[in-house]
Amino acid sequence: LHVDRQVIGCSDHDGEQAYNLDGEEMWFADFIKREGVEPQPPFIDHMTYVDGAYQGAEVNQQICKTSLDVVRRAMKDFKIED
């Protein structure tokens, strides 16, 4: 069995999207350089992600930030309890 994970997260000023296989990072979006990075070691058969993966990551960041704003507005009147 293999463990395959996709991570998408955001904040007001930062974001992340990455794909992992068995605990190894296979691809991540570098939002500073505006490109996808495949940090795979040279001793494995290189796996390449489809064209448009980085553009999809940018779209996911916009969705994440919009969702973050919606949740903030919905939760603004909730009282903090211990």
Image (spheres, rainbow, N blue to C red):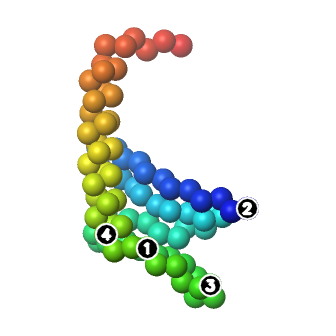
Residue 32 in sight: no
* Residue contact between numbered discs 3 and 2, judged by CB atoms under 8 Å: no
Ranked by sequence position, the earlier of labels 4 and 3 is 3
Which residue is denoted by mark 4 in the rendering?
Answer: 52
Q: Give above or below for 33 relative to 72.
A: below
Does dot 2 land on a helix, a strand or a loop? Answer: loop
> Can you give x and y, in whole percent of width and height, for residue 71 in the image?
33, 28
Which residue type carries mark 4?
A: Gly
Ranked by sequence position, the earlier of labels 4 and 2 is 2
Which of the labelled discs sits on residue 1, or is there none?
2
Which of the labelled discs sits on residue 44, or is there none?
3
* Quadrant hosting residue 53: bottom left
* Residue contact between numbered discs 4 and 3, judged by CB atoms under 8 Å: no
Ranked by sequence position, the earlier of labels 3 and 2 is 2
Does dot 4 land on a helix, a strand or a loop? Answer: loop
Question: Residue at image x 32%, y 60%?
Answer: 56
Does dot 3 land on a helix, a strand or a loop? Answer: loop
Which residue type carries mark 3?
A: Ile
| Residue 24 as seen in the image, left or right of residue 50 | right
Which residue type carries mark 2?
A: Leu
